[in-house]
Image (cartoon, rainbow, N blue to C red):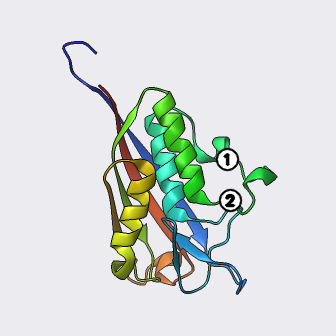
Amino acid sequence: MGCGVAEVRVGQGFDVHAFSDDPARRMVLAGVEFDGPGLVGHSDADAVAHACIDALLGAAGLGDIGGRYPDTDERWAGADSMALLADTVAAVRAEGWEVANVDCSVVAEAPRLAPRRDEMRKRLEEVVGAPVRVTGRRAEGLGAFGRGEGIACLAVALVQRP
């Protein structure tokens, strides 16, 4: 871009998973295990990690999570989404980008995130190598999320090239 101005890009990520009826399914968000029913998914169904992955891939122009880690590929069955996030961060860096920050909003009636939010943030920051903010939102009884049928996460990532 010239004149010493950093090149920056923004990516947006979104993920949604329904709650599982399988009592053995673990609930994992941002690499942190919560009590309660797990989420349905090909991998560990960590909606927070998935939204962060999509935001980072989009910002770096590297496609999307479905293209990079397709749910039709058995290699990703039961995968640890934080390991997928680490792989994504490495791919972003390999393209010459550095992650400036990631911001995540989780929409869920349960579990309550506030008691574990700092733990979630720290786990994400360890993997991403940049500041990460995690906030919880309730759907106030509206729609599938308000009825407690699942969890959605939205994420925005900023990457830069010096």
Q: What is the three-letter code of the residue carrying label 1?
A: Tyr
Q: Which mark is residue 55?
A: none
Q: Taking 8 as reference, is 55 left or right? A: right
Residue 77: quarter of image? bottom right
Question: Residue 79, labelled with which disc?
Answer: 2
Residue 136 seen in the figure: no
Front in this rendered view, residue 70 or 128 = 128
- For the N terminus, give its image quadrant: top left
Q: Nearer the viewer, mark 2 or mark 1?
A: 2
Q: Secondary structure at mark 1?
A: loop
Q: Residue at x 59, y 68 (%)?
A: 17
Type of amino acid under label 2: Ala
Q: Residue at x 48, y 62 (%)?
A: 48
Residue 146: where, in percent of width, then height? 46, 81
User: What quarter of the picture does the C terminus occupy?
Assistant: top left
Which residue carries the number 1 mark? 69
124 or 149, which lies in front?
124
